[in-house]
Image (tube, rainbow, N blue to C red):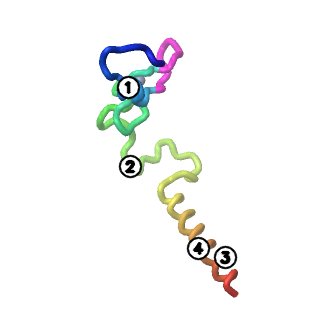
Amino acid sequence: MTSYHPRNTKPMRDSPRCGAKTRRGTPCQAPAVAGKRRCRMHGGAKGSGAPKGNQNALKHGRHTAHSKETRLLIRAFVQRTREIIEEI
Ligand SMILES: [Zn+2]
């Protein structure tokens, strides 16, 4: 996508686009809200989205912040244990 334009529009063209499916079935492609993956019409607007700790979509709890933190600690523990065994 490099069409001639008298002004510098590269940052504009390179900005992440909204991938929401439109009624036509094609991706929305409007510029996504900064730091988000959707445009202001498709859930990128300020205040949209679930509050922290919302469990409405919880299926098995494998990806919650708590379980991720627990896995990280266990991994560090196993790593340290291996190092100690290695030293012996
Ligand atoms: Zn959109």
Tag 4, which secondary structure? helix
Tag 1, which secondary structure? helix
Instruction: Write the residue at 57% across / 63% down.
Output: 71
84 to the left or right of 73: right
Mark linked to residue 10: 1
Q: Nearer the viewer, mark 2 or mark 1?
A: 1
Disc with the residue nearer the chain's start (3 vs 1)? 1
Magenta stretch, residue numbers: 19-27
Mark linked to residue 77: 4
73, 80: nearer the viewer: 80
Ligand 1 has an atom within 8 Å of the beta carbon of the residue at disc 3: no
Q: Relative to 18, is 34 above or below?
A: below
Q: Splitting the image into four quadrants, where does ligand 1 fall? A: top left
Q: Would you name the residue on which mark 2 appears?
A: 52
The outermost residue toward the bottom is 88
Disc with the residue nearer the chain's start (3 vs 4)? 4
Q: Position of residue 65 (x, y in %)?
A: 47, 55
Mark 2 and mark 1 residues within 8 Å of each other at the beta carbon: no
